[in-house]
Image: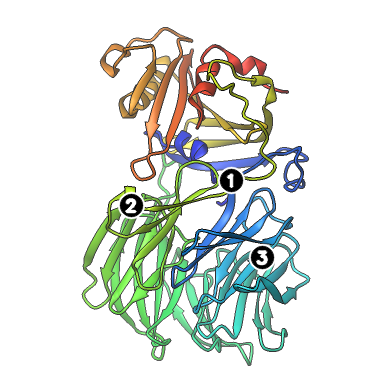
């Protein structure tokens, strides 16, 4: 879900529990005012790496759409105030990296020609917001998935070639010429003749099996599919478990030619990449894996945040920790060699922390969203997000347990995985195994790849475990003094 982009939120979720169900409410007024300086936001709604790794495209939460020239590091503005969504903001390059497609909340797709930054296509459909956009290999056609349907457009005539109602959970791909569309449906993959708008063949999947992502490769001779299959729900289960695999199909016969078993959930918003006999895939367990398509064997495995893989399998564009920051990493090289790309929104005001770091204007925060969820073992979670005028983000997580001992267990888990303990001063994990109710601990966590730090304030109140996460240590220390009571209502 693309709403949750900030490291502070992601860090708050890294507990021993995990999250099975999550519901979110974006607070009134913020979602429709991304371009207003009254609502500072510097995080990125979505981003993409061009296949040749020469360009980076991005949509920011403040409504700005832009691209970076990787060689020079220069950022070029495309749109100043896009009509973005809180959940899906697709952005995609074509195969030769010269076109950039951007979908918006109204159902319009803009296609920019780079480096001139001209809008050469404006595709308007009477459907709701754009969920995903995929170019054909030759760049002549564009497949678009909307909330209530999907279409294939000709970029030579700007005409809609086919249009169908949305299939729940759809994953789709176009072949090189854009003449064949592969789309997942109810326990099947349909192959469509785009010009006739008709299904020509169907690949049957197992019951309860669905597609997470699809990719044509080897000039359309094979279709690579990342699939998930729901396990039967048993009494006592709090959420559905899945088995996952990558299956390679011969597109002419529909026969299965390779099966690769995997355990991690594919990061479906980031496409797979096929180079020769290798397939690359990123997953939500913070790994990038490379498999051999002929043998199905794992060839390489790197620990990293999920992101976009270049067409040659040499580079990965990934989040760099703090909001608005990305890294272009040459796969397999030391993390410190990764190139940073940083967006700072014009909506961000002066720092709320004075130069000495001793004073924080805590009344400058405003609420942005709230949500609730359920842990994998059935406990309730509550979330609230705030943002300050300087774009400092704070996320509060509450875990509601049956006993104080269970809440203490969760607190101790966070203490043990912290990079360092800031408060109490000179404390270590072995000395914090018997905290008093309400006693606050300030922890710092360092991202192993970007080395960005996140500060957390954690404490227990009865059977409830509280956590405040932010990228600013001075802000966290102020919260430790009960700064929460001074947040702007």
Q: Position of residue 135 (x, y in %)?
A: 56, 77
Q: Which residue is mark 1?
A: 43
Q: Which residue is mark 3?
A: 103
Structural distance between the alpha carbons of marks 1 and 3: 18 Å
Q: Residue 337 got which mark?
A: 2
Q: Position of residue 309 (x, y in %)?
A: 41, 65
Q: Which label's residue is closer to the chain start, 2 or 1?
A: 1
Image position of 463 (left or right of 417):
right
Q: Residue 129, located in which quarter of the rendered image?
A: bottom right
Label 3: few (<14), some (14–19) or many (≥20) C-alpha neighbours in 10 Å: many
Label 2: few (<14), some (14–19) or many (≥20) C-alpha neighbours in 10 Å: few
Disc tally is 3
Q: Secondary structure at mark 3?
A: strand
350 vs 466, nearest the viewer? 350
Q: Residue furthest top?
A: 436
Task: Give the residue displayed 30% in from the left and 79% down from the top.
Answer: 276
């Amino acid at each position: 879900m693309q709403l949750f982009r900030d490291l502070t939120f992601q860090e708050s979720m890294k507990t021993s529990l995990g999250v099975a169900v999550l519901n979110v409410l974006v607070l009134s007024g913020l979602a429709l005012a991304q371009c207003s300086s009254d609502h500072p936001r510097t995080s990125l709604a979505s981003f993409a790496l061009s296949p040749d790794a020469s360009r980076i495209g991005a949509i920011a939460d403040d409504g700005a759409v832009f691209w970076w020239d990787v060689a020079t590091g220069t950022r070029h503005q495309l749109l100043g105030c896009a009509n973005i969504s809180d959940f899906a903001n697709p952005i995609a390059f074509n195969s030769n990296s010269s076109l950039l497609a951007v979908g918006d909340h109204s159902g319009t797709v803009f296609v920019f020609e780079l480096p001139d930054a001209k809008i050469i296509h404006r595709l308007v459909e009477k459907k709701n917001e754009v969920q995903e956009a995929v170019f054909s290999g030759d760049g002549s056609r564009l497949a678009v998935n909307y909330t209530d349907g999907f279409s294939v457009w000709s970029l030579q005539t700007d005409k809609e070639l086919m249009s169908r109602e949305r299939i729940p959970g759809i994953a789709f791909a176009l072949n090189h010429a854009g003449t064949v569309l592969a789309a997942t449906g109810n326990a099947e993959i349909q192959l469509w003749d785009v010009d006739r708008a008709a299904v020509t063949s169907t690949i049957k999947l197992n019951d309860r099996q669905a597609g997470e992502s699809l990719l044509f490769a080897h000039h359309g001779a094979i279709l690579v599919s990342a699939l998930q299959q729901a396990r039967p729900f048993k009494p006592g289960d709090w959420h559905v478990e899945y088995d996952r695999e990558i299956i390679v199909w011969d597109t002419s016969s529909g026969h299965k030619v390779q099966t690769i078993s995997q355990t991690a959930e594919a990061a479906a918003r980031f496409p797979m990449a096929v180079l020769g006999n290798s397939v690359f895939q990123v997953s939500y367990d913070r790994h990038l894996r490379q498999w051999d398509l002929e043998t199905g064997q794992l060839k390489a495995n790197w620990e990293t945040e999920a992101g976009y893989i270049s067409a040659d399998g040499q580079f990965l564009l990934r989040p760099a920790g703090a909001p608005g920051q990305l890294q272009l990493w040459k796969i397999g090289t030391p993390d410190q060699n990764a190139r940073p790309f940083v967006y700072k929104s014009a909506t961000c005001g002066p720092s709320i922390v004075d130069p000495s770091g001793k004073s924080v204007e805590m009344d400058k925060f405003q609420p942005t969203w709230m949500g609730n969820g359920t842990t994998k073992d059935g406990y309730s979670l509550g979330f609230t997000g705030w943002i300050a005028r300087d774009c400092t983000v704070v996320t509060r997580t509450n875990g509601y347990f049956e006993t104080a001992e269970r809440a203490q267990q969760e607190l101790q888990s966070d203490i043990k995985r912290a990079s360092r303990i800031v408060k109490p001063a000179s404390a270590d994990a072995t000395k914090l195994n018997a905290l008093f109710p309400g006693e606050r601990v300030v922890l710092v966590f360092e991202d192993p790849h970007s080395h960005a730090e996140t500060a957390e304030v954690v404490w227990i109140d009865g059977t409830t475990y509280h956590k405040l996460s932010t990228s600013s240590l001075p802000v966290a220390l102020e919260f430790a003094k009960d700064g929460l009571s001074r947040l702007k209502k």
